[in-house]
Amino acid sequence: MSWEFGVAVALIVSSAVIGLPIGHAMLASSVFYLLLQGQDMSIAFEQMLTGLYGSYVLLAIPLFIFAADLMNVGTLSDKLLDFCRALVGRFRGGLGHVNVVSSLIFSGMSGSAIADAVGMGRIIINLMTKDGKYPGSYAGAITAASAIIGPIIPPSIPMVLYALVSDTSIGFLFLGGVVPGLISGVLLMAMNAWQARIHNYPVEDPVPLRDLPRITLRAVPALLMPVILLVGIYGGITTPTEAAALAALYAFLVSTVFYRSVTLRMAYDTVRQSAKSTAAVGFLIAGALAFNYVVTIEQVPNVIRGALGETELNRVTFLLMVNAMLLLLGCLLEANAILLVIVPIFLPTAVALGVDPVHFGVIVVVNTMIGLATPPYGLLLFVVTSITRSPIRETIWHLLPFLAIMIAGLAIITFLPELVLWLPRLYGYNG
C-alpha cells in the first residue's frame, strides 16, 4: 500500500475525530488521494454517480425511511403499543417486555434502529417513567438495547447497504436476519425479567383477556405491514425494492385513510423530513463509493488476504478478530460507514476462509447495531438520554447487562451459522 493511501486514511481518521461527517471525510480523502497520485479528480465523482444511479436496490432506502417516519407521525405506534401491552404487559417488568416486543414488531416496518428509538421509544419511555414506575435511566437503557433489533429483522437499511457493496441477495439477507433477531428479542426479555426481579420493578395491571380481541383488531392494519413485505418478497410477487414501495404506500393509506391520524400537510412535512434523512444517507454512500475506488486501486483486500494467509488464520479466529474489530469501531464510527468501507475490505478474505456471505452480512449488521448503543459514542445512547433527561453515566450502567447479553447472542450466531442460514436455505439459498 502506498504512502498516499496512508495519508488518505489519516485524513479520514482526523476528520472523524474533529466531528466532520464521515461521508464528507471519505470524499475529501478520495479526492486528495487522486490529486497526490496525479490522477483525474473527476474519477471520484464518476464513481459516486455510477454507484448511486446504477443501483436499483438503493431505491429501497428512501422508501423505508418514509414508511418509518410516517408511522412515527401517525398513531400506528400507539396501536402497536396497546397490542404489545395487552400481550406481555401482565408480567413483572411488563413494560420492559412491551418495549422489546414492540421493537420486534416495529422493526418489521422501519428497518432503522434510530427510527425505533425516536418513535416507539419516546412513547414507551414515557409509559415506563410515569408515576416513577421505572427510573428514566433503565427505561432509556432497555429502549436503546431493544432498538438494536430493528435493523436485524427485515426490512433492514443496513442489510440493503451490505447487499450494495457485497453483491449479495437482499431477500436472503433479510431471511438470514429473522432468527438472530428473534434470539436477540428473547435474550433481552430474559435479561429484563432478571433485572425486574432484582430491582423489584412493578407488575402492571393486566389488560382483561376479553379486551384482547378488540385491541388486536385495532392493531391489525399496522401489523399487516411486515406481512405484506415478507409475503411480497418471499412469495415471488415483488422485489425487495418494490416491496419497500408497497410498504410506503400502505403506511400512507393506513395513516391517512384508515386511522385518519395524518393530514396531507403532515404527510408533506414527513416527505420533507424523509428527504433530508435520505440525503444524509446518500452522501455517506457517495463518499464510501469514492473511497472504495481508492481501496480497489490499492488492492487492499488482496493485501489483507495475503497477510492473513501467511499467519495461517482459520475461520474461527478470523471471525473472532472481525467481531472484536467491529465492536470497537462501532463505539467510534457510524454504523453505515463501517458497512460501506469495512465490508469490501474483509469480505474476500471471509469468503476465502469458507464464511458464507449471508452469514457474514448478518454478523456485520449485528455488530454495528450493538455499536450504536455502546459507550462512549453510541448514537442510541444520545437519542435515549435526550428523551429521558437522565445522566448518561446512569443509563450506561443499566445498559451494560443488555449489551453483555447481546454480545452473547452475537457469539451464538457467529459460531452456529445454521441459525442464520436455515431460513434462507428453506427458500432456495444454495450457500
Image (cartoon, grey):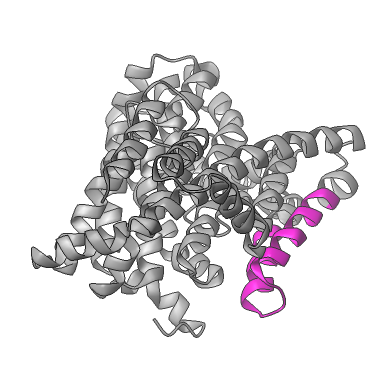
Q: Quadrant of residue 139?
A: top left
Q: Residues in magenta? A: 225-253
In front here: 37 or 242? Answer: 37
Q: Residue at x 39, y 46 (%)?
A: 368
Does 395 sit above or below residue 430? above
Screen quadrant of the C terminus: bottom left
- Residue 10 position, x and y percent, is 32, 33
Is 234 inside the magenta-drawn segment? yes
Q: Is residue 329 visible?
A: yes
Does 286 sit above or below residue 179? above
- Residue 375 position, x and y percent, is 32, 29
Q: Is residue 92 visible?
A: no
The main secondary structure of the magenta stretch is helix
In the rendered image, the residue lying farthest to the left is 311
Q: Quadrant of residue 327?
A: top left
Q: Is residue 428 left or right of residue 373?
A: right
Q: Residue at x 67, y 51 (%)?
A: 64
Q: Residue at x 44, y 35 (%)?
A: 144
Q: Is residue 425 left or right of residue 285?
A: left
In front here: 87 or 37? Answer: 37
Is 356 inside the magenta-drawn segment? no
